[in-house]
Image: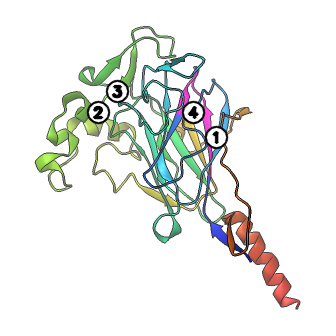
Amino acid sequence: MLTFVCSSAAMFTITNNCPFTIWPATLSGAGTTPLPTSGFQLNSGQSAQIPTTPKWSGRVWARTGCTFDASGVGKCQTADCGGKMECGGMGATPPASLFEITIGGYDNLDYYDVSFVDGYNLPIIVVPRSTASSCNATGCASDLNMGCPKELQVVGGDGGSGAPGGVIACNSACGAFNMDQYCCSGQYANPNTCKPSYYSSIFKRACPRAYSYAFDDGTSTFTCNAYEYAIIFCPNSNNNGMEQTPQPGPLITPAMKTRKKGNITSNSMLQVPASICLLLVSFLSLYLVHM
């Protein structure tokens, strides 16, 4: 017997609106199935789609100023992940702008946010697409590198920006000073003692929907049940980029790892995306009515 199980899984459509190449990366949370790619090159104006799996959780970010050899070994100026094209379970080296999501969490909702808790390297907005409800876009189109306090600045090569010696990323206060009151650690490891700092407030004023410090949950975490998340790096700055309708560029197909497909045997379960489930339920209802 073949059993169909309705599942909630979304597509990530990653778009590079920056005037330079970026290298998107993914990190899967513990106990979740890794995505088919954990790092690839995305030229200016291009988009790429990555399928997720039900109950997936993890992070998506983009690296800048990367150089890799033919075997995929090299380094990036910002948000590096162990010096490899495919991050393979390595997280981003701060500072990095992060999109974080848990798909099909409590009450079968997706929980998502954009976080600058680990600092900032690129503008990013995330726009969910859902047929069931209106969901909030989040992120920040502002270039925080331009207004980054001197003591938080990461200065490097061009980072792909064409400005040698310019600011290529902005550290969090935790990353810059490694002090408990900024890192929400030690005696500050709870929301009663760890409060917004002068530095996190700079991030929050510029990007009110993004996480600015560890306990910034109330205004920064959103829920949805989406079939797609448009993740846009360097979005249009008009209206902070939140109201724009994402227009993906020419789609590329990053190299993806294939998984072995087992034979479907008796008493097997086949996971079906939620959108297909709705169609199956509709057809089944019509069939039962006309029996």
Where is residue 192, by image quadrant? bottom left
Q: Is residue 80 left or right of residue 152?
A: right
Image depth: mark 4 or mark 3 in front: 3
Compute the Cα span from label 2 to label 4: 24 Å
Which part of the image, by quadrant, shows the N terminus? bottom right
Q: Quick one: label 3, few (<14), some, or many (20+) residues within 10 Å?
A: many
**Tag 2: amino acid:** Ser
Residue at the image position 54 percent from the left and 39 percent from the top: 241
Q: Which residues are magenta?
A: 11-24
| Residue located beneath label 2 in the image | 172
What is the distance, in whole Å, between disc 3 and disc 1 at their CAs?
33 Å
Residue for point 69% across, 71% down? 268
| Three-letter amino acid code at the position of disc 4 | Asn
The disc, 3 or 1, on the residue closer to the chain's N-terminal end is 3
Quick one: SS at disc 4? loop
Tell me, what colour scheme is on the image? rainbow
First in sequence: mark 2 vs mark 1? 2
Residue sticking out furthest to the top: 164
Q: Marks 4 and 1, Cα distance to the nearest angstrom? A: 32 Å
Residue that carries the numbered disc 1 in the rendered image: 257
Residue 6 in the magenta stretch? The answer is: no
What is the three-letter code of the residue carrying label 1?
Lys
In the picture, the quarter occupied by the C terminus is bottom right
Task: State the mark number for residue 170.
Answer: 3
Do residues under tags 2 and 4 come within 8 Å of each other at their CB atoms? no
Please tell me which residue lies in front, 222 or 32.
Answer: 32
Q: Position of residue 249 (x, y in %)?
A: 70, 33
Q: Are marks 4 and 3 in contact (CB under 8 Å)?
A: no
Query: Where does the image place residue 285, in percent across and percent down from the top left?
Result: 79, 83
Q: Position of residue 270 (x, y in %)?
A: 69, 67
Tell me which numbered mark, 4 or 1, is placed earlier along the sequence. Answer: 4
